[in-house]
Amino acid sequence: MNNNKSRKRTTRLIFLLALLSFLIATAQGLIYYKDYEPFFKYLLVLQNSINAFGFKASVTIKDTVAFIRSDPEPLKKGIGYAYCVAVFTAPYCTISFIYKFLERILRFIIFFRRSRKCKHIVVFGYNEDISSMRKNNSSDPKKVCVPVVTPDSIDSEEVYRLNKAGYMIHNADVLKAKESELPALLAKTNIEEATNIILFENSSIRNFSLLQLFRLNENDDPNRIRLAAGAKVSCRCEEEGIGRLIAEYYNSAAGTDACFDLELVGLPEMQIHKMYSDHPLHTVYKGTDKPLSEWDVHILAAGFGQLGQQAVLQAMNLGIVHESNRIVIDVFDTDVRAKKAVFLNQLSPETFDISDNRVTLKSEVADGLLEINFYELNIAHNTFYELIRGKLGSDPYTYAVIALEDIDLAVNCAMQLEELFSESGLKAPIMMRMDTDRRLAGYISAENSALADVSLIDDRSVVITLDMIINRAIDRSAKEYNHFYNNIALITADEAGAETNSDADPEQEWNRLRLFRRSSSKAAAYHDEVKDDIIPKLAEESGTQLADKLEELLGRDGSLMRYTGSAWQMRGSEEELLDKLKQDSFAYELAALEHRRWCCYMASIGWRAGERSDKFRRNPCLVTQQKLMEIKPEMCKYDLMSLMARYRKMNG
């Protein structure tokens, strides 16, 4: 709103300047043409005043100077000097009005070219990320309208580029307006018809405040803006504490029909997910004969900012390939102590053994080993490389993530690691952050001899697109995953059959979930890409073909469960099912793997064992596979659902 006032003030100032210039030109003309007959006199005065705005004043500055010299009367002299200035201010006013006129014409043309069924996507906030979104825009500006609401002023050239791409700027600080004023203030954005709302201010707190402008459910304040049915709000949040606050707010509508779908967006999370998707943690083992139990993950993480922390957190989920494989993460940073203190806020001391330089998942929480080691070292110093060289002989790295912000340091680190890995015969992926120098990034990506074995982590300016935010593939996968799991019906041996709820709307199912449940589904969907490699490998180790094994275990006459076409019927009691599960190495290892993955993911977001409570982040199943079979044997069958999903897909 302040910028709106500023623009109005500027327009008013230009108008007053134009009016003053016109009056001065008129006064000068009346004096200069005083000897003419009234009719011609007033025509000449009007002509001069108009020409002054057209860069061609009839009475030139030279004429004015000569006139002042011939009659240096103070009043005439003052008007003459003022007129000399007005000769320059009048054309300036003309240029300003022409610019404003053309800007309005451009907006009209853009509006006219749009389809009547234009898709409205309203963005709140303007920063470098939104600028990148505009540059990466692939949508048709005729069909997609993107109003941008921001309290900040934007350069006129950038406004033109935005308008050309279908982005319309609305200057307003809506957080300072009363809720009753919001509909009128945002009327031009068509916000109540928008399919997507993107809250992308730099501040997570401001985004949370913006979120509260919209009606959450039917019981919410009617003065708040009601979004269109099925609208999705993408709220940027990269602070763990604020994220929990937003989740608590949205979860208050859990179980009811929320008026909008909410997704929390974190750019570092998206960058790292794409990195692990393109270059999986188990890359060094793919195509080898090494058994899954020996697919140990040893990660070198240089730099422990937001990107480095996300690399560690997602590795705790994606590094699980067997019930007992080792995951060791070595973190290096010059200020690791302070960054570690912030990182540990999201981990529970009841779940991890925490010391000064090491964090280890407790053995009673999950199978296998999960360990994070912290080293406070200057990566530019030789001490760092000597330490790496010493580790390569006894416990070689299988993955390296260079998340340093300093480009010079990052490139030097990558070159040194590439040389060390090559000397040791390692083919481990080396991923390097390269956010600010696209020319250098292009050189490295071209696979030149220098840094040929180094791959780049896609920086946010490349990753961020409009489609990526409003139509993320991982969201679709998570929704499909959740919908499928909702439709898996498990019945006892003496039940006649069961109908699934496959006709239910996946979007409604998703909207009724608490944000934690959504995050859990996303983590499972992330790991499904890993299972695409693991499950066939596990079947191979069991000496069978995957399709045959699935039919044997879960088919129409399965040994564990019999598929009825709409449900899976257990063979016998819960106890008998568990006994059969233990006897089949393929099924047991996969169930144990999935349970361990779930435990490690839960531990990475701060959960601990205890009586079930979403509020206090407690779950009794946060135990080893052996313990789970003792205290919650009825839960073990749910770890087979990834097999059921694959059976359904393979059999249509």
Image (spheres, grey):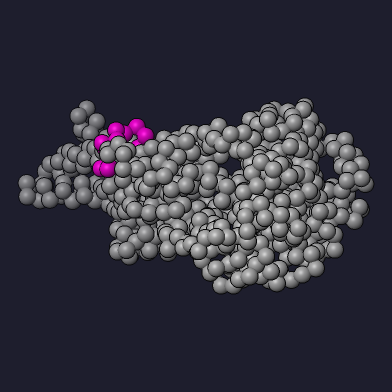
338 vs 58, left or right, is right
118 vs 631, left or right, is left
* Quarter that holds the N terminus: top left
Magenta stretch holds residue 177: yes
615 vs 560, left or right, is left
Viewer-nearest residue: 526 or 587: 587
Tag count: 0
Viewer-nearest residue: 68 or 522: 522
Magenta stretch holds residue 9: no
Q: Is residue 379 above or below residue 471?
A: above
- Residue lying at the far left of the rendered structure: 38
49 vs 488, left or right, is left
Residues in magenta, as a range: 171-184
Residue 470: x and y in percent read 47, 54
* Quarter that holds the C terminus: bottom right
Q: Is residue 620 above or below residue 530?
A: above
Q: Is residue 479 above or below residue 345?
A: below
Residue 78: x and y in percent read 24, 30
Image point (52%, 48%), residue name: 518
Image point (57%, 47%), residue name: 520
Residue 504: x and y in percent read 42, 59
Residue 568: x and y in percent read 57, 62
Viewer-nearest residue: 503 or 200: 503
Residue 478 in view: yes
Residue 402 in view: no
